[in-house]
Structure formats: C-alpha cells, structure tokens
Image (cartoon, helix red, strand yellow):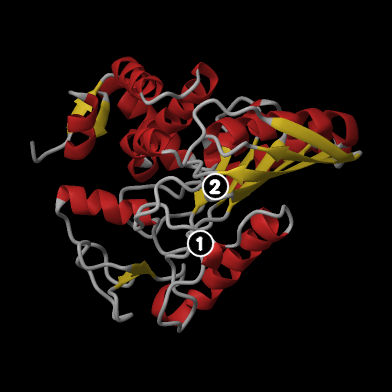
Amino acid sequence: MTETMTVDAGVLAARVTAALRAAGASAESAAATTEALMYASRIGVDSHGVRLAAHYAAMLRQGRLNPIPVLTTRRTAAATAVLDADDGLGHFACYRAMELAVGIAAESGLGAVGIVRSSHCGAAGAYALKAAEAGMIGIVTSNSDANVAPFEGAVPFHGTNPIAMAAPVAGQQPWLLDLATSSIPFNRVRLYRSLNRPLPAGVAADAQGRPTTDAHAAEMLLPLGGPDYGFKGAGLAGMVTILSAVLTGATTDPHMIPMTETDDRSTARNVGQFCLAIDPARFVGRAAYEAAMADYLGLLRQVPSTGDSRPVMAPGDREWETARHRARDGIPIDPDTRRFLGL
C-alpha cells in the first residue's frame, strides 16, 4: 500500500474509537480523541487527523498516557480556573477546559482555563470551535516539545506551539484560524515521510541546521516566516509557551520529553494548554457584533483576487469547503494509518 485511500467518515471514526479503546482508553477519553481527530481529518488537516491514532494507542500501551484519567478543576477567581488533566489524552482535557471556560464566560464575560499535566491535543481549532458553537469567541494555545529552531538558531528550542481562534458568524460557519507558529507542524514532516514526498523549501532543517526539503533528513523545523522573517514565528511561539506553560505550571518546551524521537515512552510529558472564551454580548453587544462580523466578512470576500481562479477567502473558508467535499467523497488516509486501522 503506497497511496492514500478514501474512507467513509462513520467507518473511520468507529475504527479510531475501537483502536483507542483496545489500547485501554476510557470511553470518555476515546470519544473526545476521536471527535478531535475526525474534526482535523474532515477539514483537511491530515497531519493532525486520524493518522495520530496509532501514536496515541502506542503511548497508552507503553504507559506515557493515563488511559483512565480523572480530570479535576480548581476555580481560582471569578473568570479563571485550572484543570489538571491527570496525564491523560489532551483532547479530553481540552474539550472539558473549553466547556468550563464557556460556562465561566457566561457568568463573567470572560473565561480563562489553564491546563496542566496534559498531553498532545491534536488540532487546537477543535476546541476553539466549541466556543464559537456556543456563541463565543474561543482562543486556544498549546506548547510542545522543542523541535523548532529559534530565529537564526542552530538547535531546536520552541515547540510548534499552535494558536487557534474561532469566532461565531450568524447564519454561517465560524471564522476559524488554526496555525502552528512553526513553518509547518512536525506531524506534516511525518506525513510526508509516509507518503515519500519532498517538503516545501524553507520549512525544515537537517541535524546541522541546514535547510532541507528531504522529509527523512529533517531534524528540526524553521519558525513561521522562514529564514528572513522567522523572528515573527519565534516570538509567537514564545507567547504560546508563556500562556500554556509558564502561566499554568506545565513543562516548558526545552525541558519537555519529545513526543516521538525518544526511547522514553513511559514518562508523562506535562504539556500545557490555555483556553479562553469571550462573550461578545458583554462588549459591543450581540446584535452589533453579528452585524459588524457580517459586514467585515462580506467586505473581505469581495476584495479582488490576484487573478487566479480562487476568490479571497476568510480564515476557515477553505476548511469548510474541504469538509463539504470530504463529507461527499470520503476522507483520505495515508498508508501507515491504513495499515494500523486495518483498512
């Protein structure tokens, strides 16, 4: 098997859940993780989609992840709380934390929840989207192990450290931004290795810090902005580390056990996440917010394009279009994932 194949979403979700349950995950953990992985696969973020199920199953079996975590929360002020993920699957913790943040924001206008003793949570947009579906703006960050060189640095220091934000839009799919602060996520390198494809130029470097397009030779990523403007991505990565780890007490990027490139598969990594929910009704008011969002997005999408066949798009437009296509045609999976799920 050397090519991708498309699979019906229902069949794929059932296989992923079964694989996680077989690895010992609780019903709640498996359901949350499946939901997050399917979200990513549906919108075309394949690097953070169902292909990660094999890694999570291995970490459950080898002891790094707690298969039956007991999540605990501690309210610290009117608008803040901390959630202890008990070293379980990060998807379970992030969904629960955003649910708590939304509930706090309904009371206080803002709800901020820090997460400690968590793990890799997949695509951060999955959790920001939950806030938007509740009528609120959601922002999510997560730090990760060091695999991105700082600007003009020769060794990894920051993680890929994603930032996601979702905002509700009346009568439309939410505005949705989800990006790594690195040039690409390292899971895309792993996906390209599986597919035996070359990387784009300017996104990764080899063990000596030299730029490379060989996915098999890539040892570290370059920050968002590339060789000339990578200080922007590096600065954003630091912001994520502060919110997700320094603020919460989780492990900072340089001290974190690597996600994959390590022999230690039994020690928990103490990843940190940060979830923020904002109620627009407490600021400009719901009606004014909805009118302004509609006006803003209408003007944005009417901007003349540079001449190619695609119109100017708002963040999320491409993802929702991909989701419509995949609902009709099925979700493509790579050869490694196909073997793992027995498809």
Please tell me which residue is depicted at 51% across the width and 56% down the height of the picture. 144
Q: Secondary structure at mark 1?
A: loop
Q: Which residue is mark 2?
A: 177
Please tell me which residue is depicted at 27% across the width and 70% down the height of the picture. 201
Q: Which residue is mark 1?
A: 181
Which quarter of the figure is the N terminus placed in? top left
The answer to which image quadrant residue 105 occupies is top right
**69 to 45, vertically: above or below:** above
Q: Is residue 248 left or right of residue 222?
A: right
Front residue of 291 and 316: 316
Q: Residues within 10 Å of mark 1 (few under 14, many from 20)?
A: many
What kind of residue is marked 2? Leu
Residues at marks 2 and 1, CA–CA distance in whole angstroms: 12 Å
Q: Is residue 227 left or right of residue 31?
A: left
What kind of residue is marked 1? Thr
Q: Is residue 246 left or right of residue 215?
A: right
Residue 102 location in percent, x, y?
A: 75, 31
Residue 332 location in percent, x, y?
A: 24, 32
Q: Is residue 302 left or right of residue 343?
A: right
Which quarter of the figure is the C terminus placed in? top left
